[in-house]
Image (cartoon, rainbow, N blue to C red):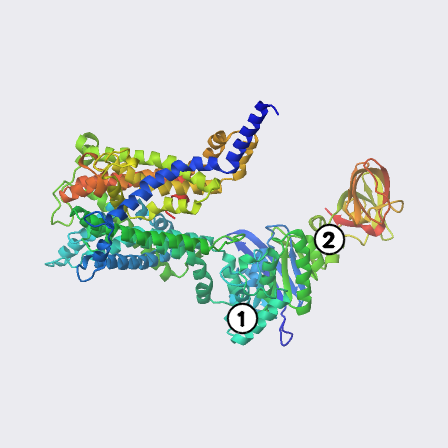
Amino acid sequence: MEPATAWNKTMQSVKSGFVRSNVAVYVLISPLLLVLLAYVVYPFYQTFVQSAQNADGAFSLANYVKFFNWSASRANLEALWTSVYISILSVVTCGIVGVSMAFLLERYEFPGRRWLALFALVPMAFPPLIGALSFTFLYGESGIFPRAFQALFGLAEVPFALRGVAGVLVVHTFTMYTYFYLNASAAIRELDPSLEEAARSLGAGRLRIWRKVILPMMTPSLVAASLLVFMTSMASYTAPLMFGVERTMTMQIYLSRTNGNLDMAATQSTILSLVSISFLILMKWYQNRRNYQNQNKGVGPHRTEVRSPAVKYLFMALSVVGVIVLMLPILVIVLLSFSVDGAWTVQILPTSYTVQHYIDLFTDERTWRPVWNSIRMSLIATAGNIVFGVAAAYAMVRLPFRGKTLMDVVIMVPWALPGTVVAVNLIAAFSQPSVFSFNQVLIGTFWIVPLAYFVRHLPLVFRSASASLLLADRSVEEAARSLGANWWLAFRRVVLPTILAGIFAGALLSFVQGIGEFVASILIYNVSTMPLSVAIFQKLYAFQFGTACAYGVLQILLIILVLAISQKLGGSKAGAPM
Amino acid sequence: MDTGVRKVKSVRLENVRKTFGGQRGVEEVDIEIRPGEFFTFLGPSGCGKTTTLRMIAGFYYPTSGRILFDGQDVTYWKPEKRNIGMVFQNYALFPHMTVFENVAFGLEVRRLSRNVIKEKTERAIRMVHLEGYGNRKITELSGGQQQRVALARALVIEPGILLLDEPLSNLDAKLREETRIEIKRLQTEIGVTTVYVTHDQTEAMTMSDRIMVMKDGVVQQVGSPQEIYNRPVNQFVASFIGESNLLDGEVLEVQDGRAAVDVGGNRLIGLAANASPNTRLVRGAKVKLLVRPESVMVGDGPNPLTGTVLLAEFKGFGISYLMQAGPLQLKAMSVNVGRGILQRGDEVTVHIPEQGIYFIGE
C-alpha cells in the first residue's frame, strides 16, 4: 500500500470516527455548556458556598441552623411559612377565578362574551411592578375607591383598604389567574365533545359527566397551572413590597442583602431555590407522567347559548363588572400619568393634569435615560438569548448526546428561580474576579444587569425556538443534506427560516420582559445604569406619581405591541411560560 | 347480550326535518326501523346521515317532526334517558380510565351492584375477545382493540337501540373487514335494533337488512341491498352503489314488454319492467341505461357489441376490462376461472343479457 493512500484512509477513518462518536456534537454543545456553567451553575454554587461557610471560610452549616432555629429568630421560618401559605392561597384564588372564567367563556354564548374574552388577557400586559402599583392606587389605604367611599358616606376613616397579605393575594389573583385561565381554556377546547356525548349516551347526567369525565381530563392542565402559580407566588417580590408584607422569603433576602448580612441572604436564597427547583422537577415529572392524547375529530366544540333571560342578564352583568375590574388598573395608570407630580395627596382623584411627563420623556435627558438604559440592556441580553437559546434548542431537539436531561433542567432552572435569587447568585459569583468574567469584578459595572436579564430570560427564547423546531419536519433538513448542502448551509437556508417566527416571538418576549424587569434589577443596578422599573420605584418614593406612571404606560404599550405582534406570528403558544 | 328480558325497540322517524340556522341539514326523513333490524344510512359526506343519527341519539333535536321508540314519542328526550348504545367514529373512549372502567361506566350510572357490574363487564369484555385486557389503559390498545372496547361499552348496558357512526373508518383495510364481520356477528347474536352510518357501500351492502341512501340531506331510496343495487331509483343511487356503466339512449320502440333503445348507434333490447319509477318508456324518450360490469359478458350472445380492450386489471377473483366499442366506453368483468386474460388492443366481443339492462329516467 502506498503511503499516500494509507494516509488518506487514516484520515477518512478519523473523520468518520469523528462523526460516529459524536465528538462533533460535543464540540458544538460545549460552548453552550460553558455558558450555562458560568452563568447559571457557578453563581448558584457560589451562593451555596457563601451560605455554607463560617467567618473563617471553613465549611459550616451554622447559617442553616440559624435559619431553622425557631427560638433564636422567628423571622426566617415565619417568612418561609408566609411565602408558602400565600402561594397556596394564590393557587386557590387563581384557580377559582381562572377556571370559572374559562368555563364561562368557552362553554357559553352570551352578549358581551367576546369583550370579556378580550379583556381577560389584560393582566398579561402588566409588568410586575405596575400591576402591584395600580392596585395600591385603586384600592390601597389612600386609594381611589376607599377614599371615594369615605367621602360618599362622610366617614372619619376609609371603610376598607387593601393591605398586607390580603393585598398581596388580590394582586396575585389579578396577575396570575391567566395561567389557570389559559390552561383551562385550552383543555376545554381540546376536550373531545364526543367523550361527553358517549357518557350521555351511556346514561350519565350532567354532574356525573363533570365528575367522571371533564374534571379528570382537565386535571393535568390544572395541576400544571397550580404548580406554575405556586412557583410564581413563591418568587413574587413586588406585591409583598408594595403591601409591606416583610415576612416573605423574597423580602427577607432583600432585607438581609440591604442590611449587609450577605451570608444570611445566601442561605435564604439557597433554601428558596431548592423549593423552586423541586417544584420545577415535580412539574416536569408530572407532565411526562400524564398525557392524554385526544383524537379530536368531526364535531367541533360547542358553546351553549344562554336562553333564560335571568341568567343571560346575570352573565351580562358579570361581563360588564369583569371588563371594568380588568380595565381599571390600566385606566388608573394612564390617568395618573397625566397628573401633576406631588399634587395628589388626600383627594379622591388628582386635581391637576398635565402632559409634561410625556414631553419630558422624549426631551429631558434625565427622564429619558432610564428608558434608554433599559432598552440597551434588554437588547444586549436578548441578542445573547437568541444566539444561545437557538443553539441550545437545536442541540436539544436535533442532536443526540449524553446528558440531555441535565442540560434541559439547567436551561430551565433560571426560569424557576426567583429574580431575587438570580441577583443574589450573580452577586455571590461576580463580586470578585473570576475566569467567567474575564477576571473582572462585574458587580457595579454596566454588564451585570444585562447578564441577569440574559440568565432570567434564556428559557423564553429556548422554549419558543425548541417548540418551533419540534413542529418543523426533520426530513426537510435531511432533504437539504441529501441535495448536497452541508450542515451550516442546511441550517441557514432550511432550518432557520422555518423556525424564525418562533425565535422572533421568543426574542420579543425576552426583550419586553427585560424592559419590565424589576426584581433582580433592584438588587444589582448602579446609579448610572438605572433601569426603567427601578426608576419607577424611585419616582414613587419621591412622590412623583405622574412620571412613574408615564414610565408605566410606556412599558404597558410596549408589552401590548409585542403581544400583538407575536399573536400575528402565531407564536402566542410559544410565548406562554409553560 | 343478556338473553333474558331484553327489549329490542323499533324506531320511527316521522317527517323529521333539521335545519342549522336556516341551512338545510336533513329534509323530511320518514322511515320505520323494525325491531332487530340492521338499518344503514348511506351517503357521501355531508349528506345528513350523521345528523339523522344524532337526532335518534338525542344530541340534536329535529326542527320539525317526531321520533318514536316503540311508539313512544322521544323527540325531545335527553340522550341519557333513551337507553341507547352508541359507538362513535373516533370511539370516544375515556382516556383516563382502563378498559374495564370504560365498559363499566354505563353500568355504574345505572347503579347496579358491584358484583353485577363486575360480572356483566367481564362478560362483555369476553364477548369482544379482550380477555385479560381489563386493566390496560386505552392508549395501550391498538385501533381494532379500541374499537372493540367501544362496542363492549355500548352493548353492556343492553341498549334498546345500537347506534354506530362510521365505526370502521379509522381502521386499516384488513381490520375493517374483520371488525365488520365481528359487528355483524354480535348484532345477529344479540338481535339488537341497529342503525349504522357509513359512506362505504361495501359495508352497507354486506351488513344491512335495509339501506337508506341519502344525498344533500334528502333521502334518495330506502330498500334492501338487492333492491338498491338492482333497482336504483335514480342516477345518483346507481352510480353511488357499486360499479356501473351509465349509457345515454333513446327509445326506439316498446313492444311485448321489451324496449329497444338506440345507444351510440347500437340497438340494445331490455325488459320494460326493468325501469325506475321515473322512466318514460315511449318512442323518442331519452333514458339512461344502467349496465353493471358483471352483466357485460365476454363472448357472443344477446345485445352483442364489439370493440377493443383499453385496460385490463387482474383482480384475482376476476378481471376488469375497460373497452372501447364505437363511441361507447364500457366496463366489463369476467370471473377468473383460469381462462386467458385479454390484453390491451385485443379485439373483443361482449354481450348484455336482457335482464342486465335497467332503465333510469333523466
The local crowd at label 1, few if under 14, some if 14 to 19, many if 20 or more residues have their Cα within 10 Å, is many
Across the whole image, how many numbered discs are drawn on residues?
Answer: 2
Q: Residue A500: x and y, percent?
A: 43, 35
The residues bearing labels 2 and 1 have C-alpha atoms spaced at a distance of: 43 Å
Near-viewer residue (A252 or A192): A252
**Marking on residue B232:** 2
Q: Earlier in the sequence, mark 2 or mark 1?
A: 1
Q: Residue A553: x and y, percent?
A: 25, 40
SS of the residue under disc 2:
loop
Q: Residue A280: x and y, percent?
A: 36, 52
The local crowd at label 2, few if under 14, some if 14 to 19, many if 20 or more residues have their Cα within 10 Å, is many
Residue occupying image coordinates x 30% and y 59%: A88
Q: Amino acid at mark 2?
A: Pro
Q: Position of A335 compared to B50: left or right? A: left
Please report, as a chain letter, where disc 1 is located.
B
**Marking on residue A401:** none
Q: Amino acid at mark 1?
A: Leu
Please say whether residue A126 is visible from this viewpoint: no
- Same chain under badges 2 and 1? The reply is yes
State whether residue B204 is above or below residue A468: below
Q: Nearer the viewer, mark 2 or mark 1?
A: 1
Q: Name the residue carrying label 1.
A: B107
Choose top left, top right, bottom left or bottom right for residue A410.
top left
Residue occupying image coordinates x 52% and y 76%: B113
Please report, as a chain letter, where disc 2 is located.
B
SS of the residue under disc 1:
helix
Near-viewer residue (A222 or A61): A61
Q: Position of A216 compared to A120: left or right? A: right
Direction right: furthest residue? B300
Q: Are marks 2 and 1 in contact (CB under 8 Å)?
A: no
* Quadrant location, the N terminus of chain B: bottom right
